[in-house]
Image: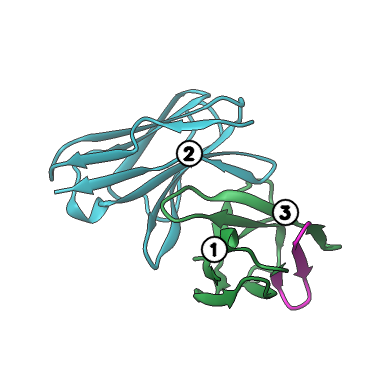
Amino acid sequence: RKEVEQDPGPFNVPEGATVAFNCTYSNSASQSFFWYRQDCRKEPKLLMSVYSSGNEDGRFTAQLNRASQYISLLIRDSKLSDSATYLCVVIASGGSYIPTFGRGTSLIVHP
Amino acid sequence: DVKVTQSSRYLVKRTGEKVFLECVQDMDHENMFWYRQDPGLGLRLIYFSYDVKMKEKGDIPEGYSVSREKKERFSLILESASTNQTSMYLCASSFAGTQYFGPGTRLLVL
């Protein structure tokens, strides 16, 4: 399994800002992509899956660029409660469902 | 909702002790995983299991073993705890690629 890379940040943004994170992956055979959110001293929780066509869930939009091998997460109208670490997860093909986690990007939203 | 529970939230052990961390999931998932998470290193896979009595090494299996005698339970064993095994240990079960994590066990080895 090859690496998944994320900018660790922290991204420090004011409430209401739009912020975007990228995550690059090196295995071109990767087939499934996810964003997880991890609050301080808590377990990671699924934020959203990333589909080839892109997907949106409220203020959150995830996109996949297979040609350049990266996925992105866009957060609009940031809230204080969005402060967390965002983990990118990639699963290669083959049916094993073994994930490779990025090290996470820290987001701090301030008043 | 999927529920994954871990036997302890916090644990303090001494060097050389045998340590058991237990994980139970209630959704009949076949796949279960043990990770450790350390600052700056992210989540690292220790072991995983596809089914009862099946186990596979992850990226950092040294110093650990696992047991899966029942589908819902996956145990991580530190045969002889060392200070460099002080960490946050996270268990997960998965279905169709989505991971469901337990709350984690913070282990301190003195």
Residue at horizontal 78 percent and vertical 57 percent from the top: A58
Q: Is residue A10 visible?
A: yes
In the rendered image, the residue lying farthest to the front is A111
Q: Is residue A29 above or below residue B52?
A: below
Q: In front: mark 2 or mark 1?
A: 1
Where does residue B97 sit, x and y in percent of width and height? 66, 46
Quarter occupied by residue B30: top right
Amino acid of disc 1: Ser
Q: Residues within 10 Å of mark 2 (few under 14, many from 20)?
A: many
Sequence-first tag of 3 and 1: 3
What stretch of residues is rendered in magenta?
Answer: A58-73
Distance, label 2 to label 1, CA atoms, is 21 Å
The chain carrying label 3 is: A
Where does residue A31 sit, x and y in percent of width and height? 73, 58
Give the prevailing secondary structure in the magenta stretch.
strand
Q: Is residue A73 left or right of residue A54?
A: left
Where does residue B110 sit, x and y in percent of width and height? 13, 49
The chain carrying label 2 is: B
Query: SS at mark 2?
Result: loop
Instruction: Identify the residue under disc 3.
Output: A49
Distance, label 2 to label 3, CA atoms, is 19 Å
Across the whole image, how many numbered discs are drawn on residues? 3
The stretch drawn in magenta includes residue B54: no
Instruction: Identify the residue under disc 2.
Output: B102
The quadrant in which the N terminus of chain A is found is bottom right
Amino acid of disc 3: Ser
Task: Report the chain shown in green.
Answer: A
Query: SS at mark 1?
Result: loop
Q: Is residue A13 above or below residue B39?
A: below
The quadrant in which the C terminus of chain A is found is bottom right
